[in-house]
Image (spheres, rainbow, N blue to C red):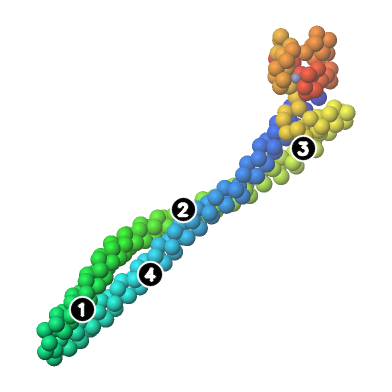
Amino acid sequence: MKQWIESLLALQKVDMRIINLHLRLKMIPAEIKKLEEKKSNTETNLSETKSSMQKTGLDIKHAESVIAEINTKIEQLQQQSSLIKKNTEYKAMLSQIETQKEKISEQETIMLTLFDKDEENKEKYKEITKEFEAEKSEISEEIAELNELSSEVNAEIQQLIDSRPPLEARVDSAVLTQYKRLIKAKKAPLAKINSTGICSNCHLKITPQTMTETKKEAVVYCDNCSCLLYLEK
Ligand SMILES: [Zn+2]
């Protein structure tokens, strides 16, 4: 194999690795963001459950004070009723007491619902707290790993970039210019030609004349996709 092909293949290996590493690097910020969002969603869920828990607590206290007020009122009505002489007035008073007792019953039904809700909230809060604690350290670890990966990838890219000049120096400048033009499309600039004359990049058949040139290992381009061609051995 002629030296220009060997050198360009070595350069292409380096450049394709750099391209892939850049792609990997590009994905990292979104991966970190996703992890941070997951953590913040759990945090929001936790604080919403806490607020709901506090609100239910206040609602229970309110219902309790309403019941206490009504009980005081009933006591007052009962005291007043003992002083009443007229039967009709006494009956009216009893009816008022009955109405107040119904109100208590309503409040008690409300309280039962609130107790259920309180129970539910407490259970949910416990669960989310557990989930959050486990998730917190796990996510921090994953983010640290991604940051570490990012520095490793950057270091490797730098090493690869540093290894390029000696490889470039071995290639004719006109060929190198064409190579650089092709690599800008972020795909391999060199394509293999098999014995039947099919280009490994575009999968189309090259002309017999191009095939003859390729066999001579001359600098030649695919008729269809303009890749630099070399013969598969
Ligand atoms: Zn081609």
- Please tell me how crowded label 2 is: few (under 14), some (14-19), or many (20+) other residues with Cα within 10 Å: some
Nearest the camera: 93 or 220?
Answer: 93
Query: Helix or strand or loop: what does disc 2 sit on?
Result: helix
Q: Residue at x 76, y 27 (%)?
A: 189
Q: Earlier in the sequence, mark 4 or mark 2?
A: 4
Placement of 197 over or under 161, stated as above or below: above
Q: Earlier in the sequence, mark 3 or mark 2?
A: 2
Residue linked to disc 2: 138
Tell whether 229 sits left or right of 71.
Answer: right
CA distance separating discs 4 and 1: 35 Å
Q: How dense is the environment of label 3, judged by Cα within 10 Å: few (below 14), some, or many (20 and up)? A: some
Instruction: Give the quarter of the image for residue 100.
Output: bottom left
Position in image of residue 62 (x %, y %): 32, 75
> How far separated are the C-alphas under marks 3 and 2?
39 Å
| Numbered tag placed on residue 54 in the rendering | 4
Residue type beneath disc 1 = Gln
Q: Earlier in the sequence, mark 4 or mark 1?
A: 4
- Residue 175: x and y in percent read 85, 27
Q: Is residue 148 visible?
A: no
According to the picture, the residue beneath numbered tag 3 turns out to be 164
Give the amino acid type for the residue marked by disc 3 in the picture.
Arg
The residue sitting at 13% across, 91% down in the picture is 83
Amino acid at dot 4: Gln
